[in-house]
Amino acid sequence: MSLRKFITNKTTAALAVLLTVFANTSAFAQEAAAGAAAAPKVDMGEVYKSVIFYILIFLAVCLFIAIIGKSIKVYELSREAQGKPVGINWNRVHASLFALFLVLGLYGVYWEYTVHGSMLLPDAASEHGKKIDEMFNLTLIITTIVFILTHILLFGFAYIYKYSAKRKAYYYPHNNTIEKIWTIVPALVLTVLVLMGFLTWRSIFFKVEDQNNKPLQIEVTSEQFKWSIRYPGADGIVGKKNYKLTTSSNTLGIDFKDLNSRDDEMADEMVIPVGKPVKLILNSKDVIHSFYMPHFRVQLNTVPGMQTIFEFTPTKTTRQMQEETNDPNFKFLFFCAKICGSGHWNMQKDVRVVSEAEYKTWIAEQKTYLNDDLRKQFNLPVAPAPAKPAAEGDSSATDSAAVKGNQMALNK
């Protein structure tokens, strides 16, 4: 082979190009390593937190795909210009990709059930929550079966019946039997699910009150960004309120003309007895919030100017849930599930489910909403101050305290 032919040979030229690129790359790598060793270290942690970084990554990936696509297009055009057969059978490639996506998708379903399935909430801790969970599970099972079958058919048909020049597609325009099946069967399934949902909804929202086991009333008022919890007093009835009565001292706008409101008590947490119906009275002072108790399967909006009422019965105490979850720090909580402003993230309260005896002990320690300042503001008699204990043998002090107490009682 002559020197000229050796130089112009394509294989030789390609090897020369590769050798040159390798040499230049090695030199650049050595220079970069030396420069990196000499240069001070730069903290790149913040770069990965910026939106621009991920946008650039996305654009780089798109550019890479575009380059690959153009290279394949040039390859196909060059073969076409040389009169050679098509190098890539795209029908086969696309059919194989459909089959690959089917396998990956089915594995994704399995992975979601096994990994994320364990992240679902534990069993419901309320009576109606069990019914909701049964509906959810039934719907999830049906939709999963339909999802798997339809996607096996979709991707399977795309792979099996990919284009082939050796066969002709069969013309199949219509089939009454198939039309009836995929119309009647989904209609029946959806009808059953809707009826179940309707009956479950009625059983939750329309209850006959048991006179021997009346629900415990608890009023919850939402505002940016906190919750206020009001319990009834000895009368068992939460008193009325009116937004027009809201002042700096009467922040909830309680109407003290209603005698039921004068013994109402405030609490920093929600404590409820297990096995007893609880009637929530929900309202809002400013914007729409969403009262959400996930473990009890309760979620309702709190709307300014109106009351939302919901009744449920807790079935598990906090102590039982701590044992079931093997978490001694477990707590029931209720949140705001509506993005209501900058402090939305911290809008939550503890919920303790206790025995009846523990609840009675706790409620006896709570303070009434009506204090001396409010009594003066609304011209109500001030509550008598507790008498100081008298010294031993000093009966005069005891007698005088009794007389004063009787006088104040008469002035009410």
Image (cartoon, rainbow, N blue to C red):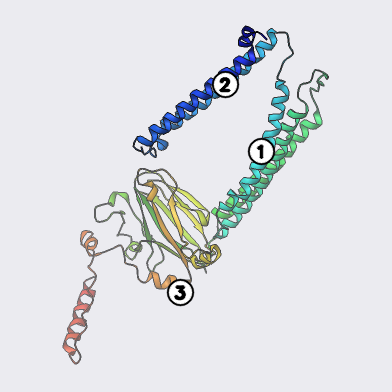
Q: Is residue 353 above or below residue 221?
A: below
Cα distance in 3D space between marks 1 and 3: 55 Å
- Residue at 40% over, 33% down: 34
Camera-near label (3 vs 2) is 2
Q: Is residue 139 above or below residue 364?
A: above
Cα distance in 3D space between marks 2 and 1: 38 Å
Residue type at mark 3: give it.
Ala
Q: Earlier in the sequence, mark 2 or mark 1?
A: 2
- Residue at 31% over, 64% down: 262
Q: In this view, does 274 lie above or below 80?
A: below
Q: Which of marks 3 and 2 is nearer the N terminus?
A: 2
Regarding mark 2 in the picture, which secondary structure is present there?
Answer: helix
Q: Which of marks 1 and 3 is nearer the N terminus?
A: 1
Cα distance in 3D space between marks 3 and 2: 85 Å
Residue 104 has which mark? Answer: 1
Regarding mark 1 in the picture, which secondary structure is present there?
Answer: helix
Within the image, what quadrant is residue 147 found in? top right
Total numbered labels placed on residues in the image: 3
Residue 18 has which mark? Answer: 2
Camera-near label (1 vs 3) is 1
Residue type at mark 1: give it.
Leu
Residue 110: image location, x then y, percent: 66, 45
Camera-near label (2 vs 1) is 2
Residue 11: image location, x then y, percent: 64, 16
Residue with the mark numbered 3: 357
